[in-house]
Image (cartoon, rainbow, N blue to C red):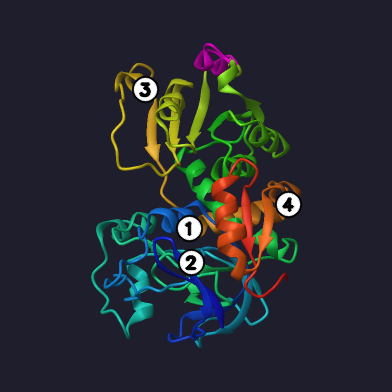
Amino acid sequence: MKGLLFYDRGDLRYSDIPEPEIEDENQVKVKVAYCGICGTDLHEYLEGPIFFPKKGDVNPISGATVPICPGHEMSGIVEKVGSNVTHLKPGDHVVIEASAHCSDMVHYKKTVEPKPFCSACKAGKPNCCKNTNFIGLGVASGGFGQYVVYGAEHILKVPDSIPIDTAALVEPISVAWHGVERANFKPGQTALVLGGGPIGLASILALRGHKAGKIVCSEPALIRRELAKKLGAEVFNPMDHKDPIGDLKALVPETEGFDASFDCSGIPVTFSTSIDALGPGGTAVNVAIWADKPIKYIPMCLTYQEKFATGSMGYVVDDFAAVIKAIDSGLIPIDCIRHMITGKVEPKDTVEKGFKELITHKETNVKILVTPNGRI
């Protein structure tokens, strides 16, 4: 098959590569329809390897080595199923919950000897696995190739009501959905989203799926504010306010601050705002991925009003199932998801028309989809 391979930082090559085949009775082979380019893919290209194994190393879950096809935001069509798989059949439209953890070692018995589960996996928190990885980021080749093979427990059928290109965005919306779940969010509550990038916009949709009351997106860039408004949020430009915290809290006077906030930017000012703009007992969720550097933090900003601050890491299969249900029911409108798709590229053009476009024009792009098998 054809695919785009990651060799090392700045080194992606489009070439003929071996087509993956089912090697375990609980695996599924999927023909990739669409695969979104994620910010994580860009970080690997610019700064990696981060999740990908370094040259000479192996992935601890699967034993895989570079080169590996990137791509983990996938929709596709089932090509073949293992003998133990009963919930899927060839021809089904599917999405792939892309995480990998201790339980996935069983699929790679030929290359890795299964080890005891880590504490997180034993506790039922596989997204916090100490060896956490993803298809398309190290454990196996992903959606920038024509076919993928992965464990059946990660693959969910998509109803006919959801177009297959739109289905590729179930993955980033699931990242946001997990963050909303971490806030123990209740219908009718108010929410502040800090940052109008891909995950910030996905958070607006996830909040709509949770039947949020007022949703406010704080974002300096005009283009992103306009898109956030199209998705259903009230928008706020912090650069236009002398007292942004006070003015944000004034938007929800009944609770003197937001019930929950979601930092999707990952800079010191958004971290502090995520806490300071909460009402008493509110919850701040960090969804952003930060550089490994400390920032200033005043503990009493939580203590005085018994606020909560927590983090959100990736997703679990239940998040994908909930997002699919919310889209199918209309809680998350398909037209709103389509607003996030700002381009489609062929694999051979992924670096020039995908990666570089997102790096140099991130304000005008949200999600560019790769089409390994042509547009479906």
Between the C-alphas of marks 4 and 2, the distance is 26 Å
Task: Identify the residue under disc 3.
Answer: 306
Q: Which disc, if any, is residue 41?
A: 1
Task: Identify the residue under disc 2.
Answer: 70
- Residue drawn 39% across the image and 68% down it: 138
Between the C-alphas of marks 4 and 1, the distance is 25 Å
Q: Nearer the viewer, residue 333 or 34?
A: 34
Residue 255, above or below 73:
above
Residue 308, above or below 104:
above
> How would you rate the neighbour count of disc 1 (Cα within 10 Å): few for under 14, some for 14-19, many for 20 or more?
many
Callout in the foreground (1, 3):
1
Task: Identify the residue under disc 4.
Answer: 334
Q: SS for tag 1?
A: helix
Q: What amino acid type should be assigned to the residue bearing mark 3?
A: Glu
> How would you rate the neighbour count of disc 4 (Cα within 10 Å): few for under 14, some for 14-19, many for 20 or more?
some
Q: Main secondary structure of the magenta part?
A: helix
Sequence-wise, the earlier of marks 4 and 2 is: 2
Q: Quadrant of the C terminus?
A: bottom right
Q: SS for tag 2?
A: loop
Between the C-alphas of marks 4 and 3, the distance is 38 Å
Sequence-wise, the earlier of marks 2 and 3 is: 2
Between the C-alphas of marks 1 and 3, the distance is 38 Å
Count of picture labels: 4
Q: Position of residue 85 (x, y in %)?
A: 52, 81
Between the C-alphas of marks 2 and 1, the distance is 7 Å
Q: SS for tag 4?
A: helix
Q: Nearer the viewer, residue 221 or 115?
A: 221
Q: Position of residue 59 (x, y in %)?
A: 32, 70
Q: Is disc 1 in contact with disc 3, using a CB cutoff of under 8 Å?
A: no
